Image (tube, rainbow, N blue to C red):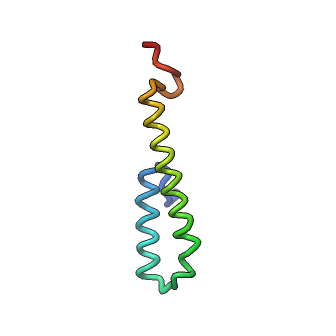
Amino acid sequence: MADYIPGADAKFNAWLDNFVTYANANLGLVAADLTPITTAQTAWNTALAAHVSAQQGAKSAGWHGVGGMDDG
């Protein structure tokens, strides 16, 4: 069976936003029920932003992934 939770960061982020919105509007949950989910969502958003920023910083410094530094 295929995994319904996407693996790519941007797709997961969109899935998570949709899940939280849907759960909040349609599952009859109270705020306390959603607190663990929204707390995790906030942590994810913070970590993703830091990850993207670090990637951009590495690229601007000349890092090109597995191959290493740009020689010139």
Which quadrant does the N terminus fall into?
bottom right
Residue occupying image coordinates x 45% and y 26%: 61
Give the image quarter of residue 36.
bottom right
Residue 24's place in the image compared with 54, above or below, is: below
Point out the image quarter for the C terminus: top left
Q: Residue furthest right?
A: 36
Classify residue 49 as left or right of residue 36. left
Which residue lies at the image location 48% right of the left edge and 86% below the top edge?
28
On the picture, is 38 further left or further right than 17? right
Q: Nearer the viewer, residue 68 or 22?
A: 68
- For image coordinates 52% across by 82% down, the residue present is 31
What residue is drawn where x is 51% and y is 63%? 41
Q: How many marks?
A: 0
From this view, report whether residue 34 is shown above or below residue 28.
above
Q: Position of residue 56 (x, y in %)?
A: 43, 36
- Tell me if residue 48 comes above or below residue 36 in the rendering: above
Residue in front for this viewpoint, 45 or 19: 45
